[in-house]
Amino acid sequence: MDSSCIDYKDTGFFSQTVIDYIEDKPELRSFYSFRPDWGGFSQVLKNRKVTADREVLAKVLTEQYASISDLGFGISNLVSDNISLLKSSDTYTVTTGHQLNIFAGPLYFIYKIVTVIKLARQLKERHPDKNFVPVYWMASEDHDFAEINYTNIGGKKVHWWYEASGATGRINPDTMRQALNQYKGVLGLEHHGGELAEIVEQAYAGFDKLADATRYLVNALFGQYGLVIIDADDRRLKRQFAYIIEQDIIEEHSFKHITATNEKLEKLGVHIQVNPREINFFYLGEGLRERIVFEDEQYKVLNTEINFSKDELIAGIKNYPERFSPNVVMRPLYQEYILPNIAYVGGGAEVVYWMELKSNFEHYGVDFPILILRNSGLVIPQRSAAKIAKMEISDCELFKNADRIKNDWIKKHSTHQLTLQSELNGFQQLFEKIKQRSAKIDPTLIQSASAVQARLEHAIGNLEKKLIRAEKENHQTRLEQIDHIKTELFPKDSLQERTENFGLFYVKWGQGFIDELIKHFEPLDFQFTILSE
């Protein structure tokens, strides 16, 4: 593939806060630790305080990967080596996290993981005396099933129709057959279709938990690059975090610190992504993940009969830490507590919401990672690339809405003079003379002259629109191609990566698609990548 890049701000799809973070606006500096550049990494490697129990971490990961190897599907030597390296004090992780979207959800699921793989490689090149392990954190405790039970591929929505409850990672995917067959039908049998069909069939038909199915799928795609996949829904990992669970539920520290931070961010005009609750933990069980609240001097689990006194709560956390699940504002702290992590890779909204959390990290004495905006990309198939080249549409123009592209194209390619700006300038000069003459007779006439000028400028503007509209009709066939390009590359008027699944790209290029992404993505350049055949 060929690649080119444009600035994120030129796409119009990223928030001002994200742009300000990339551009190092001073007012945001207090909400994160180190800059997302090589200098920032050099600083964090000198100061990183690791709270993780490395031996336990490696043991848990080894056992989790046994679910793959027990079925006769081995893990790569690079993954095994990386798990072993985590025991060493000079090994660090670069992490991204995401929900367990079926069939890997939209493309940005893939882009997140590619970013951590590439960044880990580059860190090793710059710091050869240390090791860097790319990690995908499965959000297996998340219970928002409606957010993960579908994917869009080739203009079709593949939906897993099922009434689920509790942590999604514990759901049995045995009811996925209809969705699985539909997805495989879209893949077809040409090129690498059969290869990917076999991977998803084994993933969703070969395991009894969605977390294990997702691990298999992601490992099949990324294991050869050394990606380590972690499911933090584990008693031993929760036990390390038990003291913070207890303190935060009883003292409500996260609520106090994050609320105060959000107030500061709002004063800067930042759109708040998440708001904390007084208690930021759920109670977890089979088919159950419900909020814990404090009412009538009791800790209660909503929508159940479960409740605790303070002493019973403390005993419960001590004896059964696996039953307590962090929500969105405490999950990052849990992640950084049990991993030797130095960077978190996330989307624009994630980068902003992590900025809300730094003060809470400081309270608990846990180091805050470097925040990396994941790579974003647009993949342009050959048929669209040819049309774009023929119509001489630039990379930046692609991101404008279709009407704007058409208007600009008509103005640029029409053999007629469609803009009336020079005529309008002449009118404005004429009216300046009229106003001066009128003022000598009666100063109040200036207002009347201005009103006439405004009506004429409005009429000229309408006439220019009619000229452009008429010329569009003369080039209707060419302009329809713009609609086709936009529909294919920006489904639902959104970024391709936010809607389209990776499947059909894999069918065409196989593992080479991921190789090309790794080749062209540059994690610390912070530019939008455009890939075309």
Image (spheres, helix red, strand yellow):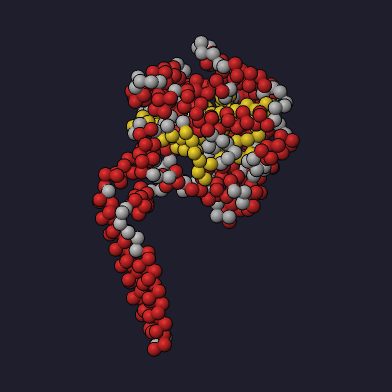
Which quarter of the rendered picture does the C terminus lie within? top left
Q: Which residue is drawn at 38% across and 76% down?
A: 431
Counting from the top left corner in percent of width and height, residue 265 is at 59, 52
Give residue 419's quadrant in the image: bottom left
Q: Which residue is drawn at 57% across and 36% down?
A: 523
Residue 327 appears left or right of 482: right
Give the total number of marks visible in the rendering.
0
Camera sees residue 262: no
> Which one is nearer the viewer's eye here, 91 or 519?
519
Task: Identify whether 36 is placed above or below 312.
Answer: below
Camera sees residue 392: yes
Residue 446 appears left or right of 63: left
> Which one is nearer the viewer's eye here, 178 or 508?
508
> Which one is nearer the viewer's eye here, 101 or 330?
101
Q: Residue at x 72, y 27 (%)?
A: 129
Counting from the top left corner in percent of width and height, residue 335 is at 61, 32
Give residue 244's quadrant in the image: top right
Counting from the top left corner in percent of width and height, residue 397 is at 42, 47
